[in-house]
Amino acid sequence: MPLPPVIFEDASLIAFDKPSGMLVAPDRWDKQRENLMGLVHDKMGHGVANVHRLDADTSGLLLCAKNKIALDFLSGQFQSKTVGKKYHALVVVLAAEHAMKVAVPIRDAAGALPDAFTVDLSLGEDERQKGRMRVFKGRGGKDCLSEFRALEKFGRFAFVECRPLTGRTHQLRVHLAAAGAPILNDPFYGDPAIKLLLSELKRRYKGRDEEKPLIDRLALHASELTLKHPETKEPFTITAPVPHEFEVALKYLRKFAIGARALR
């Protein structure tokens, strides 16, 4: 299998646009399952190393260092939480009673998702469900903070910019679910019965009997990283374009969703 598209490359760095469904590193239980770093090492050698990770189902920007000096410099920024991270997500806006109490109100006066909100909830492993995380209201979890901004609202759906200020596993997915706005098609923290279908947006829809959702994957994309370059020591930003299936979904939401509203 070929490497994913390269977004950026120079003497010290290489950044890939990882597709949804691809592991970054070898699977803990299935070592034979294909993964991005296995492909990278086969084609570029073991001197190239990833400096962060993405969930398998999350698409987008995955940054790698080409040498140890760059790896140490970049890893230090991730560990010190000085890297600016931006994600984009399509979320399902549930009724207000599905939202937990967080750092600021996560429903406006009308009970709708606000234009901007913060989630400050500790997270830890869910002992009852292997591979999942949960909110801890007392001891046991790790501090976790995320900022969100609704870019466009489409009734029961919204297009949201996400900025994780910490780097916990499934952080954005759990925080959005806690806010009553789980990511579309999230099998762990969302409602698998909710699909984004053109027939539910467009009046007098005339399509196939076996309709496919407009987007049928976890609707979360790692869009941007801002950090200091290992050679120049100056801030720089790398971006990964929004995937085609996001563009298709947004096009129909903008055209047919009742009450569609851009907030950018």
Image (cartoon, rainbow, N blue to C red):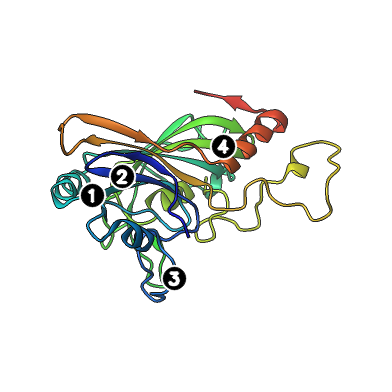
Q: Position of residue 165 (x, y in %)?
A: 29, 42
SS class of the residue under badge 2? strand
In percent of the image, x 46 and y 38: which residue is there? 106
Spatial distance from mark 2 to mark 1, Cα to Cα? 7 Å
Q: Position of residue 237 (x, y in %)?
A: 31, 32
Q: Is residue 47 left or right of residue 53?
A: left
Q: Is residue 58 left or right of residue 144?
A: right
Instruction: Give the residue number, with chain letter if any, for mark 4.
Output: 158
SS class of the residue under badge 3? loop
Q: Nearer the viewer, mark 4 or mark 2?
A: 2
In percent of the image, x 36 and y 68: which residue is there? 26
Which is more toward the observer, 224 or 147? 224
Instruction: Give the residue number, with chain letter if any, for mark 1.
Output: 66
Q: Earlier in the sequence, mark 2 or mark 3?
A: 2
> Do the residues under discs 2 and 1 have CB atoms within 8 angstroms?
yes
Instruction: Give the residue number, with chain letter if any, for mark 2.
Output: 14
Vertical placement of residue 140 versus 48, above or below: below
Q: Is residue 163 left or right of residue 151?
A: left
Instruction: Give the residue number, with chain letter if any, for mark 3.
Output: 33
Label 2: how many residues lie within 10 Å, few (<14), some (14-19) or many (20+)? Answer: some
SS class of the residue under badge 4? strand
Spatial distance from mark 4 to mark 2, Cα to Cα? 32 Å
Residue 34, labelled with which disc? Answer: none
Which is more toward the observer, 202 or 234? 234
Q: Earlier in the sequence, mark 1 or mark 4?
A: 1
SS class of the residue under badge 1? loop
Disc 2 residue type (three-letter): Ile
- Residue 136 seen in the current view: no
- Residue 8 seen in the current view: yes
Which is more toward the observer, 241 or 159? 241
